[in-house]
Image: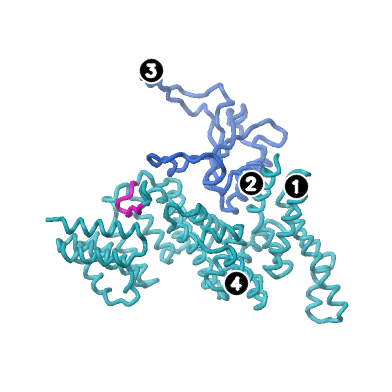
Chain colours: A blue, B cyan
Amino acid sequence: MRFMIIVRATPDTEAGVMPEEPLMAAMASYHEALAKAGVLLDVAGLQPSAKGWRVRYRAGRVSVVDGPFADTQSLVAGYTLIQVRSREEAMEWARRFPAPMGEQADAEIEVRQLYEVSDFAPGKQRRADTGHP
Amino acid sequence: MTQEATHRAIEAVWRIESAKVIAHVARLVRDVGLAEELAQDALVSALEHWPEAGLPNNPGAWLMAAAKNRALDRLRQDVLHARKHEELGHDLDALQAHVVPDFVDALAEASEDDIGDDLLRLVFTACHPLLSTDARVALTLRLIGGLTTDEIARAYLVPEKTIAQRIVRAKRTLTEARVPFEVPRAADLPARLGSVLEVIYLVFNEGYSATAGDDWMRPALCAEALRMGRIVAELMPDESEVLGLVALMEIQASRTSARVDDEGRPVLLMDQDRSRWDPLLIRRGLIALARAESLGGARGPYALQAALAACHARAREADATDWAQIVALYDALAQVAPSPVIELNRAVAVGMAFGPAAGLEIVDALGVEPSLANYHWLPSVRGDLLAKLGRLDEARVEFERAAEMTRNARERDLLMARARAVGNSP
């Protein structure tokens, strides 16, 4: 099963401020540990929303709204995609995630389980989120 | 946290850490079986302490330290024991070397790199050619995969006792033969690595052959094999065949949800709904393959098989398949790893690239191959080529023969359906 560890944006990430060296090193070593454990599928950091845009669908009309966006808390700054055998394993890896904005800074990460392609088989009941397929 | 939740959390920690802990302890005590026992003791101790005290901040380091202390105690006892019996010899010198203070300190400061080396030693030891294939598979799943005996038994549809005995015997064999805990020397490396990759691919294929209704541990073997393959690829980043195998497994795994239909019947590659292939796994597979090729490993057997899988992965529709390229790859594979099965697959590709008559020629040359006498894919392929040539009666006979030979009920249905289809054609 796959889980996405999502790092929320902060004013710093939105300003395009690159993390300090110790944090960079902590992130690198965390992801190296994931890779060495054979669980890392993908990882990426996202550029500030100022460089992005939204496509808005309203009553059948489509419009494009350029960033930046003010609702920082709902923005994503990066993600790490892992493949593990159980929910608890994902939890343990998430627990080890370095404080994403530096040791003393407030921040939040969120972990979500992915649907697998097989979850969308026609007529198939989606598996409940029990930790075992 | 409830007791139950804590236990599951400890289980997860164990799964992440156990191989590293066992590997590191094995380097101290030079015995994989004993190392696993000592690591298990550390786990038991965690199960006693953590539910009350809570999970430590660094549970991996906790387990490692607990297991290592047990190992060092054990070594000290051995020295005392040996002294008492005046069995002073070179064995004792070796044991004492483990307990002189500066040596112990040095051991305590094992870096991440050292732990990687230990893990690699563990992988090679579990896949030692001295052991039977079954024993290698069981031991690898247990020591590297961190699976319980029960999980392995369920995955292989055998009683738990069978697996338990297999693992005990394997450990005993390694101990009795005094198999050194090491990464093989350069001269032995290709063959020994071959054994490691074979074990991993066997596990993958066992999972890949699982059918609907099987215990969920069976298909989970694919994920286990992929995980172990990725681990070995991280440990040996310059070995192109490791990357070749990883690429092969990633691409094959990408088709998991397209290869059976809603009723659990197998769907042939050419008939699969390619929108259900997993693009992330394909991308990972193609990257691993490109890396294997850039290391000069394009003609390794696993890299070639991965390249074949990649040809299909790159074709957005079945009709867009580059059959000429596939024929070229099978030609290369037939040279480095000749086998009747590969020859048969080459015949299929030739049939697609250059017409059924050319394919049939190769199949007919294989007709006398004794190792294919009970291989249902031979008449199945022959039937397919004959049908394309319009020789429908002969095709029907071949499909029926293939249906009689397969032991897989779903495949039999598929073949009988094909026999009926050509029988009904005008």
* Main secondary-structure element of the magenta-colored stretch: loop
What distance separates the C-alpha of mark 3 from that of mark 1?
A: 55 Å
Q: Chain of mark 4?
A: B
Q: Is residue B244 visible?
A: no
Tag 2, which secondary structure?
Answer: helix
| Label 1 neighbour load within 10 Å: few <14, some 14-19, many 20+ | some
Q: Residue furthest right?
A: B84
* Residue B254 is a magenta residue: no
Judged left or right of residue B391, residue B416 is right
What distance separates the C-alpha of mark 1 from that of mark 4?
A: 38 Å
Q: Chain of mark 3?
A: A
What distance separates the C-alpha of mark 3 from that of mark 2?
A: 45 Å
Identify the residue at horizontal 78%, vertical 75% (top origin).
B94
Q: For mark 1, what is the residue?
A: B50
Q: Residue furthest top?
A: A59
User: What is the three-letter code of the residue carrying label 4?
Assistant: Pro
Give whichever of B217, B21 is nearer the camera. Answer: B217
| Label 3 neighbour load within 10 Å: few <14, some 14-19, many 20+ | few
Kindly indicate the quadrant of the structure image that contains residue B128: bottom right
Q: For mark 2, what is the residue?
A: A30
Relative vertical location of residue B226 with respect to residue B369 in this rendering, above or below = above
The numbered mark at residue A59 is 3
- At which x and y percent is residue B352? 24, 59
Q: Chain of mark 2?
A: A
